[in-house]
Image (tube, rainbow, N blue to C red):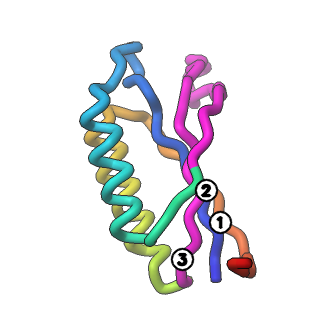
Amino acid sequence: MKRATFTIPKQDNEGRTFPKTTILEIQRNILETYGGYTVRSVHGGWMDGDGKVYQEQNFEYTVVLEEHQLKDLKNWLEKMKAVLRQEAMFLEVGDTEVTFI
């Protein structure tokens, strides 16, 4: 199994907050696709190739998936990049073992 962590911004790169309905739709899609998620509110920053600094408030999602699902997740994040008007999307993937107790 794989653990994937990715961020969904609360605002676009111009500082406009996304409607709550947009975030809820994203969460529903994640839930239906992966069966569950953990979400945290995080703050981060990054610098693009031209030296422009972006400071962001994000939702950080963690999901567990099979390795064959990674390509679909990457494709979905590419779509979210356009929908959310982002320069880049963050994705971290690692191996994991899940146990429900």
Q: Is mark 1 on a helix, strand or loop?
A: strand
Horizontal and vertical percent for residue 3?
64, 69
Residue 51, quarter of the rendered image: top right
Q: Which amino acid lies under the numbered mark 2 shown in the image of this protein?
A: Thr
Q: Splitting the image into 4 quarters, where does residue 29 fall?
A: bottom left
Look at mark 1 in the image and give the residue it sits on. 93
Q: On residue 27, which mark appears?
A: none
Q: Residue at x 25, y 35 (%)?
A: 21
Q: Earlier in the sequence, mark 3 or mark 1?
A: 3
Residue pictured at 49% horizontal, 65% vertical: 36
Residue 53 visible in the displayed image: yes
**In which quadrant is the C terminus drawn?**
bottom right
Task: Verify whether residue 25 appears in magenta.
Answer: no
Q: Which of marks 2 and 3 is nearer the N terminus?
A: 2
Q: In the structure shown, which secondary structural element does the residue marked by tag 3 occupy?
A: strand
Report the quarter where the N terminus lies: bottom right
Identify which amino acid the numbered label 1 is placed on. Answer: Val
SS at mark 2 in the image: strand
The magenta stretch spans residue 59:
yes
Q: Which amino acid does label 3 sit on?
A: Leu
> Position of 56 compared to 35: left or right?
right
**Residue holding disc 2:** 5
Q: Mark 3 sits on what residue?
A: 65
Count of numbered circles on the image: 3
Using the numbered discs, state the Cα–Cα distance from disc 2 to disc 3 in whole angstroms.
11 Å
Please state the extent of the stretch shown in magenta in the rendering.
39-66
